[in-house]
Image (cartoon, coloured by chain):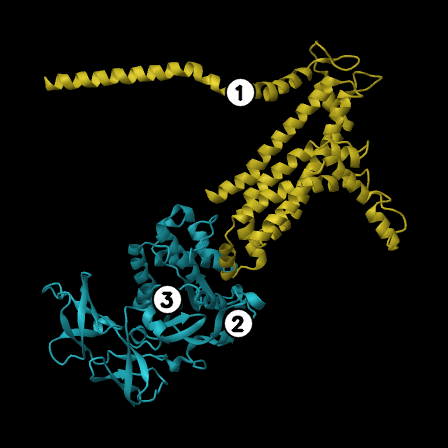
Chain colours: A yellow, B cyan
Amino acid sequence: MAVTQHIDTTGAQAGADMAALTAERESHGWKWLLSLPALTILVFAASGPLLIVLIYSVLTPAEYGGVVWELSGRAWFQVFFRRDIFDPDEVTLNWSHLSVLWRSVSLAFQTTVICAILGFPTAWFISTRPPGQREIWLLLITIPFWTNLVIRTFAIQEVIRNQGVINSLLMNLNIIHSPIQMMYTDFAILVGMAYVFLPLMVLPVFAAMDKLDTRLLEAGYDLYASRWEVLRRIVFPLVRPGFIAGSILVFIPSIGSYVTPRLLGGGRNMMLSNLIELQFGQGRNWPLGAALALTLLVIVLVALVFYLRTIGGDEDKQHG
Amino acid sequence: MADRRDGPGSGDNEIEIKRLSKVFGQGDAAFRALDDVSLGIRRGEFFTLLGPSGCGKTTLLRLIAGFEQPSAGEVIINGRQVAGLGPNARPVNTVFQNYALFPHMTVADNIGFGLRMLGKPAAEIRETTERMLALVRMEAMAARKPSEISGGQQQRVALARALAPQPRVLLLDEPLSALDLKLRKEMQSELKRLQNETGITFVFVTHDQHEALTMSDRIAVMSGGRILQSGRPTEIYNHPAERFVADFIGDTNFLDVELVAVNGATAEVRLPGGGTRRATLPEGLAPDPGSHVTIVIRPEHASVTEEAADFEGTVEDAVFFGTDTHLNLRLSDAARFTLRRQNTGAGDGAMPEGSRVGVRVADGGIQVLRN
């Protein structure tokens, strides 16, 4: 009797659980509405436009810009190859596009390296200041961020152009007799991008250094390590996450840079964004512009995976 | 009593500190962390720097390690002036307060770090690392990261890491303060064992008098950047020369008494009861008979007596501590006296409040203070 009763009660309990579960499941029926704002943004601001770009890249360009709704692989073909004007059967690599692609990747990479080399001592300097001073230095690093990018780029122009600060100073000191051509070169683009994106490297590296326990450095010295060994075996491995974050933060906007190469590189030293703009403007080839934009996206994704696999993977090996 | 035999110039000293001072900051903001300290630490001994926080003990340790450079004075390790040498050029290793293990390296790599930096061959590094792991009983944890082992285990690894390069001196900066009581007791005997097995000179910094008394061969008590007294634990405890030392270590009764006569290292003092007893004088102190001095009597050096009492007191209260009972007495309006009655199993040692008791001080239980 007691046993039966026991079974009965557990049975009732199970029934109640089921009811609760069903109720919960039913309530999920409308709960997703709560995520509507997020879904709206994701669809209309992120995935939607990307989808449109993807669709445009496989359509045919209209004569005065825009597209004709006719499927075509020509834009993607044009990204990498070109047909001879006189002999359409002769296909060659499109070197003018490929060189812009290569310049974008290479300049973005160099910018990242320069920012890392300049950012490390800067972050180290700030993190070793007394607590009250640190905030001031961080503020000084971020102030240029609040200034318009175009104005900052013009300022760089003022420094490096033929009649600019550097050249007139060197000429007045009789060190050189004719100005060094710095404007409208890859060097000018590098200077501009490194200047603009440096804070994006300094801040995450500083954040990593700030967490670094100085007693670890003392422990290193105590165990017979030289300054260099302490730097190499203790500081670098521990601030590496900051470098990874900083490298990603610098590389991505660098490779998509538009204003800096436009103002400092002139018309000839284009980067990918300038080429894309050209296709949507004067070039009136929207599908090619769309295909180039997606190519940029793929490069960024590949670079990200590469970073996380190599630098991040090293980290795993060390921690595993 | 200040031990003069270990003064600078002694031949078998591992470390000699000569008139060492360290000033932090400048001008009005200057802080004298260490003030004209001289000290000798003998080869192979367990030497403790004891004092409250801010007394300069850690500064002295950091000056020996080379993390700081002195403002004045000399540090001599194994007969060699080490002024200007960095920590990586001194035959000294440190166990840090919070261990400072390298978080990105395994336990084994942490222990081998010093040897790698010294450029030892790989086989020797591996062999020594294994020996050190066995010494601190951490063989099973060799491949773990510091974050994956407990606080007590991290402590052992920190010890092994500092011992691996076989330094002449091991400096320990409050290494047990982060551990709970039970682990701390375990590590205390572990440290003594390691010191005996390795024969390395240990310089141990602590603010814990019990740690200092139980572990040390000799203790230096520090306050305000100075060494007030150094000597064996029994000397420091039984014969404190200064009020601070007596107060800092153990429970103490201070009494102001009249000095009747001086006979070399001892003196006759008049106790509150009117009778005179023999008291020990701090070394080098010869006060004039008739002057007033402060004496120290440890609570356990006095007992309740029926006859031949040195003085009498009224019981204010009795506190039972298990092993003993503290009897708090009022001698006069100004003077209080605590004595400790050992729990012998017969009764709790308490006396009724307000009763008059006679107190007898054991022979050799009275110490005159310097100030």
The one of B11 and B246 positioned closer to us in this rendering: B246
Tag 3 and tag 2 share a subunit: yes
Query: In the orientation shown, which residue stands out farthest toward the front?
Result: B333
Side (left or right) of A147 relative to A178: left
> Disc 1 designates what residue?
A37
Q: Is residue A185 placed above or below A134 in the rendered structure?
A: above
Q: Residue at x 56, y 40 (%)?
A: A311
- The image position of residue A60, as x and y in percent, is 73, 13
Please rate how many residues cluster around mark 2, counting C-alpha atoms within 10 Å: few if below 14, some from 14 to 19, many from 20: many
Tag 1 and tag 3 share a subunit: no
Q: Is residue B261 placed above or below A50 in the rendered structure?
A: below
Q: Residue at x 35, y 56 (%)?
A: B134
For the residue labelled by badge 3, is the local secondary structure a helix, a strand or a loop?
A: helix
**Residue mark closest to the camera, 3 vs 2:** 2
Side (left or right) of B62 relative to B358: right
Tag 1 and tag 2 share a subunit: no
- The image position of residue B139, as x and y in percent, is 36, 52
Q: Is residue B89 placed above or below B2 in the rendered structure?
A: above
Callouts 1 and 2 close, C-beta under 8 Å: no
For the residue labelled by badge 2, is the local secondary structure a helix, a strand or a loop?
A: loop
Callouts 1 and 3 close, C-beta under 8 Å: no
Which quadrant would the C terminus of chain A be assigned to in this image? top left
The chain identifier of the residue carrying mark 1 reads A
Side (left or right) of A259 relative to B80: right
Mark carried by residue B198:
3
